[in-house]
Image (cartoon, rainbow, N blue to C red):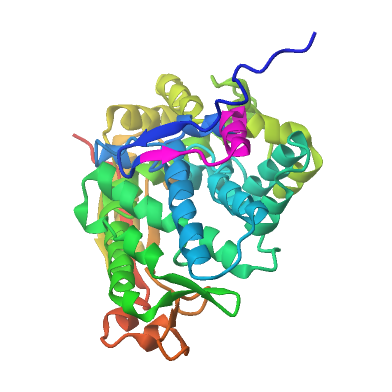
Amino acid sequence: MQLQSKVNSNNKKKIFNDPVYGFISIPQEIIFDVIEHPYFQRLRRIKQLGLTHLVYPGALHTRFHHVLGAMHLMTKAVGTIRRKGHEITEDEEQAVLLAILLHDIGHGPFSHALEHDIVSGVSHEEISCFFIERLSAEFDGKLDLALKVFKNEHPKKFLYQLVSSQLDMDRMDYLNRDSFYTGVSEGKIGSDRIIEMMNVSNGELVIEEKGIYSIEKFIVARRIMYWQVYLHKTVVAAEFMLIHILRRAKKLVQEGHNLFGSPALLYFMKNNISANDFRENEEVLQQFAQLDDYDILGAIKVWQFESDTVLSELSKRMVDRNLFKIEVSKEVFSTERVNEVSATIQTNIEVKDIDVEHFVYTERLTNNAYSDDKQNIKLLKKSGEILELSKASDNLNISALTKPVEKYFLSYPVFK
């Protein structure tokens, strides 16, 4: 018996009411079908900003919100480029819309923390490729062209640049969206004007010269958002705590401890998964598709009562938002300072010397708002000349922003 589709095929051009842009329409039926797929619906259960809500309580938006917004901006970019005389066929439009819609589908819960230990040696971009390949197989090859765009294998390079570059629809949406939900107004950019200034020259995406000040504001906004939101010191402390919670739990599971966890989470705890495993074993992708924020948070709630001191202490602090103190410096913290902090911890918690690393974190933070040595932004002058952005600017803003800023942090628990 064949199951009937739950949706009438003539009722697929739905409208989403988005708090950032207003109404977002689904332009093609295949896009509706992809959005309905369980792989995609999973993005509703993954927060866009991970643990940032521990600092900015409103930052509870999901990756589902984000990719719909990025798709909305892509429809505008396609319209602008077509209007300026450059051909984008209907198939290419569908491909680039699907590519941006699926660009984040490979993210796991708390993705950057997850990539350290739950899976290793495989990026979320690679996992996105695996998902797109699988979806294309399910949709009779209708996503093959989208995969080519996503992997930069399409002859029209500007299509890939709209999906992934230093001025893509991904960045334009997440700056506006993250700014909106965190309340950090400095992150808001003029996406409509930037898109209106887009053009294509020699097959590459360019910005018309009169848009240079909008681009400067875009880069400044990105720099500010990194320090105030993405690399906010308290967010960094929380993320490193989560990394060490998962690292400790995985070690215990592989030593034979019977920890609580969903089947999908325990699968990645018990096995050391690499990119080859995703390629060679279809079960890996299916298990990954079952992982979301709820698996991690539900496990941590239970782990706070485990007998292992390291896991229980870290988990309880995370649940109660009793986060580690963090110091930020322009200089590397001395070995003496790190040892002093480590000794203080051991006087308050009974942990082995080897386990102190789970309570003392010292790393480098790098903020590079614009890099002029990769996929750089190019300006189209009225004369037709193409210039790299930092060479075209008439002030020092862009040149200064191409220099990465590095800071160092030392994070550790404080005992009452």
Image spot of residue 273 (x, y percent):
69, 41
| Residue 333 seen by the camera | no
User: Between residues 207 and 216, which one lies in front from this camera angle?
Assistant: 207
What residue appears at the point 26 percent right and 62 percent down from the top-left corner? 224
- With 229 as the anchor, is 95 left or right in this view? right
Q: Quadrant of residue 102?
A: top right
Q: Residue at x 37, y 68 (%)?
A: 369
Q: Which residues are magenta?
A: 23-39
Is residue 32 found inside the magenta-colored segment of the image? yes
Q: What residue appears at the point 44 percent right and 82 percent down from the top-left corner?
A: 380
User: Quick check: can you spot residue 247?
Assistant: yes
The reply, left or right, for residue 263 in relation to residue 308 is right
Q: Give residue 108's quadrant in the image.
A: top right
User: Can you say whether 98 is above or below 268 in the image?
Assistant: below
Total marks placed: 0
Residue 82 position, x and y percent, is 52, 64
Q: Nearer the viewer, residue 289 or 44?
A: 44
Q: Which one is nearer the viewer's eye here, 268 or 108?
A: 108
